[in-house]
Image (tube, rainbow, N blue to C red):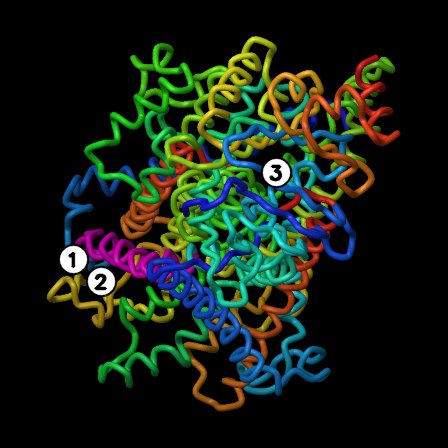
């Protein structure tokens, strides 16, 4: 183990993110040269004719939004209870369950969605087909729930105990102590958890791909969550194999990847801005 | 809660445990209104535990148990038989300052008003006035009046401790508990806190824990000496310091004097 | 941790009920995920299912090649990623200034944020086309190695940072050079972090589907690879393809069985990491 080896591995890992960015930019140049902003705001995607990314951007955003709508209240509520209400043994159990469940592969959620949840959604809302934005969002919500919960819990739990004691000594009740003395200090960590959960939901491919319906169109009306749609990741997952690394189709997929990369990096940057330096799952 | 009689706290046959480990046994003391009491004793003798029993702050340790009678203004505060003890109300009546100044990561102004605001003790229009009064009371007003909106963490340790005191006083407590309030301060800041204790003792009941015998001697009227898991001796400050009854007290006082 | 004193007043009670409700719901959701998997897939898990290759496009036979393929990719990725991650973490903590360390950590976090499908795109072009590996298990291994690199680096760094400064100073006071210090102090005292990171990385790599979907795997017709540029078949791909195309009932039960197997594999790695971390590591 000599320093030169350390230096090389260091160079590899610190440059990888940059290399991927360069790859994405250079790969998507042809599409932006040909279509410009049309690519981002175009609503049509027909291989060999025209490429527009808006439906996929829309799908990714909506699906992520639904997922957060589920994972945030449940995850943060559970984190508060785990850190502040239950005893030490129960906390250990809940934490372990969440940490283990955070690793359940996306494909498992995809399968559950494909074979069960789509049917439930279809029957529950009387739809023709259960493959829709709502189903994908629900699955993603459950999928990122453990991540959001366990990272938020970390942030809440590290708030030093003397703040709680001080607040209690002033006569505050448990819920007031949590809301006014504990949570304000845990906010950077909780935001970090939210951002990390969001990036995971955005980038998830298979769990979405199997249940979103894979229709490259913005639903009509646009707030119709029961309509089939398409997300960036699922679009790439569906078509990457066909495009075999050359031609405008490939460039369009790489450009989609660049957009996704931009969305995710913005969030990562925001997470760092709020002072989050947590561990990874 | 208004105290009908002259005594604020009465402790009768009180035993304190963590799990099955007794911390203090057979505690029998009374504390008069508007007096200053100090609790002294070697490390680990249960000084803080006794102090925290008075505002039920030990409740937050799952294994803590208290038997016997602890009464505040004639109400037994550990008697939950008719569910009548309002712990939150009790703690509003009993202010507390800890060894380390503990300020919330907000502004100086918000910290002074933390209790008042959250407990909605006073209307909003009075907030600024309360803040000024309380900061004046702890001689901090002149030092911070230009930077009330600054973070409380900018203050020195001594200022932070006085701010903690102001925050406790803002809730208008009748009793003030201080857990080694000067232990983490420099001599000059300690002096400021000490003179504040003396001043407050004329209108509040002050009970404080200290390691510093000289401090106990100068400030308090009554001294409680804890050792070996029980109240070894308690009484007037002169009696304890000039002619202690027990060998243990003599040894402790002598050991510290030398 | 403090336990609660039951809040008086309506707000407190309402708040308490609300948070408890979220907890019960969360736990129920996650427990139901596991129980559905066990209920649907548990019945097909027999020794034959694990030990036989699949036949008739998944409708008959077992999932031997799929399990092997998944493990080859994950373990291969771990083996490649581990030295690089270790080198990175050591170089950072021993040779870089604090300011620079935080810059590097940002880059590592950025890499962690990259969606897995993009590793697939990148790897397909770079390893598959430029390096001529094609759709092969080696491409897959390299792609997954990149993907799990941040997990390992962060975990190892966490452990290195938690080494008490006295140990380090004791070594330096004896006149050790930094490489000697790394060998005698840093690696032994951060060993739990190295193992934890590796296990977490393996868990991630085992469950990953998108990155290897069109770069390393094929659905049917391969067993163990005989050369570097052959694809493998994995549990992930098996589940993905079968779940979309299976019409046969026995194929459906095979797909549940495969998914349960995959989940158990992932759980083995991640619970291993959990046990080691709660025993040695940073207290959570």
Is A95 situated left or right of A125 in this image?
Answer: right
Rate crowding at label 3 as few (under 14), some (14 to 19) or many (20 or more) other CA atoms within 10 Å.
many
Of badges 3 and 1, the one in the foreground is 3
Name the foreground residue: B11 vs A189: B11
Q: Is residue C113 visible?
A: no
Name the foreground residue: B103 vs B90: B90
The answer to whether the residue labelled 2 contacts the one labelled 3, judged by CB atoms less than 8 Å apart, is no
The quadrant in which residue C164 appears is top right
Given the image, what chain letter belongs to the residue carrying mark 1?
Answer: A
Is B65 situated left or right of A107 in this image?
Answer: right
Name the foreground residue: C247 vs A193: A193
Q: Earlier in the sequence, mark 2 or mark 1?
A: 1
**Residue furthest left in the image:** A221
The answer to whether the residue labelled 2 contacts the one labelled 1, judged by CB atoms less than 8 Å apart, is yes
Magenta highlight: main SS: helix
Given the image, what chain letter belongs to the residue carrying mark 3?
Answer: C
Residue B43 in the image: state x and y as whole percent. 76, 31
Residue receiving disc 3: C153
User: What label sits on residue A44 in the rendered view?
Assistant: 1
Element carrying mark 3:
helix
Given the image, what chain letter belongs to the residue carrying mark 2?
Answer: A
Point 20% across, 59% down: residue: A46
User: What label sits on residue A216 in the rendered view?
Assistant: 2
Point 70% across, 21% down: residue: B238
């Amino acid at each position: 183990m000599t320093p030169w080896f350390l230096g090389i591995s260091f160079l590899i890992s610190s440059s990888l993110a940059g290399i991927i960015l360069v790859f994405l930019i250079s790969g998507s140049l042809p599409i932006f040269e040909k279509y410009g902003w049309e690519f981002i705001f175009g609503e049509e995607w027909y291989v060999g004719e025209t490429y527009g990314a808006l439906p996929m951007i829309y799908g990714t955003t909506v699906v992520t939004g639904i997922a957060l709508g589920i994972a945030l209240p449940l995850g943060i509520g559970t984190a508060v209870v785990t850190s502040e209400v239950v005893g030490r043994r129960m906390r250990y159990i809940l934490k372990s369950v969440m940490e283990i469940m955070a690793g359940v592969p996306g494909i498992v959620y995809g399968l559950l969605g494909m074979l069960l949840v789509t049917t439930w959604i279809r029957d529950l809302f009387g739809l023709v087909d259960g493959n829709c934005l709502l189903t994908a969002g629900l699955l993603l919500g459950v999928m990122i729930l453990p991540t959001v919960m366990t990272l938020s819990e970390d942030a809440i739990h590290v708030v030093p105990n003397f703040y709680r004691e001080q607040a209690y000594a002033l006569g505050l009740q448990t819920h007031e102590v949590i809301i006014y003395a504990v949570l304000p200090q845990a906010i950077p960590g909780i935001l970090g958890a939210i951002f990390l959960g969001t990036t995971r939901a955005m980038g998830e491919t298979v769990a979405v791909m199997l249940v979103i319906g894979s229709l490259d169109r913005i639903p009509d009306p646009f707030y119709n969550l029961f309509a089939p749609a398409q997300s960036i990741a699922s679009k790439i997952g569906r078509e990457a194999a066909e495009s075999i690394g050359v031609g405008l189709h490939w460039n369009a997929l790489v450009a989609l990847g660049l957009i996704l990369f931009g969305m995710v990096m913005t969030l990562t940057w925001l997470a760092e801005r709020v002072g989050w330096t947590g561990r990874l799952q | 809660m208004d105290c009908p009689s002259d005594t604020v706290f009465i402790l009768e046959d009180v035993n304190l445990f963590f799990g099955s480990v007794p911390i203090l046994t057979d505690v029998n003391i009374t504390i008069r209104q508007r007096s200053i009491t100090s609790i002294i004793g070697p490390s680990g003798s249960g000084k803080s535990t006794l102090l925290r029993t008075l505002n039920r702050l030990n409740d937050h340790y799952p294994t803590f148990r208290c038997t016997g009678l602890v009464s505040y203004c004639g109400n037994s505060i550990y008697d939950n038989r008719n569910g009548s003890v309002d712990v939150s109300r009790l703690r509003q009546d009993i202010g507390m300052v800890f060894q380390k100044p503990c300020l919330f990561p907000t502004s100086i102004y918000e910290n002074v008003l933390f209790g008042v605001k959250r407990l909605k003790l006073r209307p909003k229009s009075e907030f600024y006035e309360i803040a000024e009064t309380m900061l004046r009371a702890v001689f901090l007003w002149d030092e911070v009046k230009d930077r009330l909106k600054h973070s409380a963490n900018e203050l020195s340790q001594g200022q932070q401790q006085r701010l903690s005191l102001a925050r406790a006083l803002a809730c208008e407590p009748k009793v003030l508990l201080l857990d080694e309030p000067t232990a983490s301060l420099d001599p000059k800041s300690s002096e400021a806190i000490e003179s504040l204790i003396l001043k407050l003792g004329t209108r509040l009941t002050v009970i404080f824990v200290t390691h510093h015998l000289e401090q106990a001697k100068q400030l308090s009227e009554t001294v409680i000496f804890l050792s070996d898991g029980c109240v070894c001796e308690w009484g007037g400050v002169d009696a304890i310091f000039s002619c202690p009854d027990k060998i243990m007290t003599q040894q402790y006082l002598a050991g510290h004097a030398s | 941790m403090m336990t609660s004193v039951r809040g008086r007043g309506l707000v407190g009670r309402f708040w308490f009920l609300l948070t408890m409700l979220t907890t019960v719901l969360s736990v129920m959701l996650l427990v139901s995920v596991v129980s559905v998997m066990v209920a649907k897939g548990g019945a097909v898990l027999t020794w034959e299912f694990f030990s036989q290759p699949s036949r008739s496009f998944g409708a008959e036979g077992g999932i031997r090649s799929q399990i092997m393929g998944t493990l080859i990719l994950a373990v291969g990725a771990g083996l490649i990623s581990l030295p690089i991650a270790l080198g990175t973490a050591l170089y950072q903590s021993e040779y870089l200034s604090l300011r620079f360390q935080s810059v590097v950590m940002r880059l590592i976090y950025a890499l962690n944020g990259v969606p897995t499908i993009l590793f697939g795109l990148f790897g397909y072009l770079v390893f598959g086309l430029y390096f001529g590996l094609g759709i092969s298990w080696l491409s897959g291994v390299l792609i997954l190695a990149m993907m799990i690199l941040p997990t390992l680096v962060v975990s190892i760094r966490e452990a290195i940072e938690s080494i008490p400064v006295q140990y380090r100073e004791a070594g330096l006071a004896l006149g050790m050079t930094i490489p000697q210090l790394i060998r005698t102090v840093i690696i032994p005292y951060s060993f739990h972090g190295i193992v934890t990171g590796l296990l977490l990385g393996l868990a991630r790599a085992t469950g990953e589907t998108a990155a290897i979907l069109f770069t390393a795997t094929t659905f049917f017709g391969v067993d163990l690879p005989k050369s570097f540029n052959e694809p493998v078949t994995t549990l992930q791909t098996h589940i993905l393809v079968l779940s979309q195309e299976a019409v046969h009932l026995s194929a459906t039960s095979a797909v549940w069985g495969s998914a349960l197997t995959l989940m158990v594999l992932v759980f083995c790695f991640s619970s291993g990491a959990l046990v080691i971390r709660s025993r040695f590591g940073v207290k959570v």
